[in-house]
């Protein structure tokens, strides 16, 4: 079906006529000489007299040019039949702990020791980019929780934000409850069967203003499903770190993480090394997408180029009509002078 997107543009059609009526005639400031043999002078100069043509014939090319420009400005389109668009997927927020303990290098990647945060970046970066059809967002939390990226289909940008996350950028503590509360605030406006939060931490809640279990109850009321992941190697009772009293793995509050997942219908995962984290990523990847509101769209083919191109061609023809007789006369004069 053919239609104009901006049909109101045609209200500007009488604008040239109004301007000609309102504005005074142009005055060149030069003296004018009235002669009765104008036609003969035009004939001698090689120009065809058009004074005897009706006014409408003189103005018709310019009126047509104006009409073509209006047609182009009104955005003509050929609109097809409505087609259904697939709208499956979830609204998935990933909350990553960036507190000081995430800097411990007790994980391995390709036989090299890496920090917990670096391993999360390497594995969950791929997880985020593979979520085709999902809106994905990123929360970074330490002493406070911050929305680093809102829900978006631009998964590559979300991964970039994750890759650029720094230790202690949100403070040295761990505010798990605040991270859940922020996620609920962002997900509560989305369809109820598509709200998912993946929370990754290596410690216990020791910051923020909301208790994790309270935040979990709020999430359950808003039908936000939470998958919790506890990351870090098992506590070491021997070795150098154990002898020095540095035992980062003992801080992980697994009972609370289990309770959060249980209250919201999610699952708790324990990642002690890269292989377990890969398995968790694969498990999360198998979640069934929740069908959202179906949408329909009508394909539209823009046609403004046709009237615009026609207007350009008509302009060139009008210019050629004015310049061509003068060019022929100039050429004839040069030939005459050379012959003489």
Image (cartoon, grey):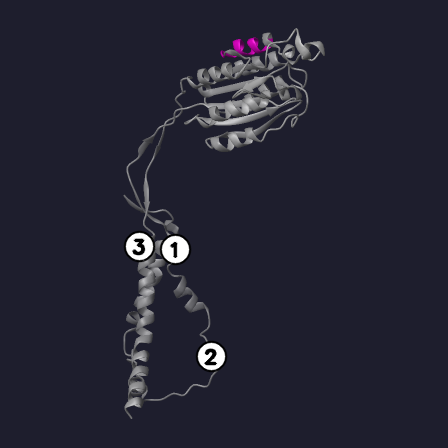
Which residue position is annotated with label 1? 11
| N-terminal-most mark, 3 or 1 | 1
Q: Nearer the viewer, mark 1 or mark 2?
A: 2
| Above/below status of 19 relative to 276 | below
Let me know if residue 223 appears in the view.
no
Residue at 40% across, 17% down: 288
Using the rendered view, name the quadrant where residue 121 is placed: top right
Please state the horizontal and vertical placement of residue 234, each as a whole percent of the image: 60, 10
Q: Nearer the viewer, mark 3 or mark 1?
A: 3
Q: Evaluate if marks 1 and 2 touch, with contact meaning CB atoms under 8 Å apart.
A: no
Location of the C terminus (image quadrant): bottom left
Which residue position is annotated with label 2? 28
Indicate the secondary structure of the residue bearing disc 1: helix
| Above/below status of 309 relative to 32 | above
| N-terminal-most mark, 2 or 3 | 2
Q: Nearer the viewer, residue 59 or 177?
A: 177
Residue at 32% across, 56% down: 307
Boundaries of the magenta span: 256-266
Q: Nearer the viewer, residue 132 or 68?
A: 132
Is residue 64 highlighted in magenta? no
Q: CA distance from mark 1 to mark 2?
A: 32 Å
């Amino acid at each position: 079906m053919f239609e104009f997107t901006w049909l109101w543009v045609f209200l500007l059609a009488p604008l040239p006529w109004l301007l000609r009526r309102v504005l005074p005639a142009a005055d060149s400031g030069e003296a004018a000489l009235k002669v009765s043999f104008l036609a003969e002078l035009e004939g001698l100069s090689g120009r065809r007299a058009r004074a005897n043509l009706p006014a409408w014939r003189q103005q018709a090319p310019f009126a047509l040019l104006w009409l073509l420009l209006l047609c182009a400005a009104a955005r003509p389109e050929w609109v097809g039949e409505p087609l259904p668009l697939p709208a499956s997927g979830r609204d998935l927020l990933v909350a990553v702990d960036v507190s000081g303990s995430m800097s411990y290098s007790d994980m391995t990647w390709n036989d090299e020791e890496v920090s917990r945060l670096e391993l999360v970046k390497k594995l969950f970066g791929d997880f985020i980019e593979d979520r085709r059809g999902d809106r994905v967002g990123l929360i970074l939390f330490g002493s406070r929780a911050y929305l680093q990226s809102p829900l978006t289909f631009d998964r590559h940008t979300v991964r970039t934000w994750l890759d650029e996350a720094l230790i202690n950028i949100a403070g040295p503590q761990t505010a798990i409850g605040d991270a859940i509360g922020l996620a609920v605030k962002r997900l509560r406006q989305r369809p109820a069967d598509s709200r998912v939060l993946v929370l990754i931490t290596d410690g216990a809640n020791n910051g923020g203003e909301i208790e994790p279990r309270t935040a979990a109850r709020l999430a359950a009321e808003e039908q936000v499903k939470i998958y919790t992941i506890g990351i870090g190697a098992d506590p070491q009772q021997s070795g150098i770190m154990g002898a020095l009293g540095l035992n980062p793995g003992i801080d992980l509050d697994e009972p609370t993480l289990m309770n959060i997942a249980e209250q919201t219908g999610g699952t708790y995962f324990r990642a002690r090394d890269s292989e377990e984290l890969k398995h968790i990523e694969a498990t999360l990847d198998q979640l069934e997408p929740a069908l959202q509101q179906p949408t329909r769209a009508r394909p539209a083919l823009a046609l403004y180029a046709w009237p615009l191109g026609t207007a350009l061609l008509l302009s060139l023809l009008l210019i050629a009509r004015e310049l061509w007789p003068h060019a022929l006369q100039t050429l004839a004069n040069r030939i005459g002078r050379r012959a003489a």
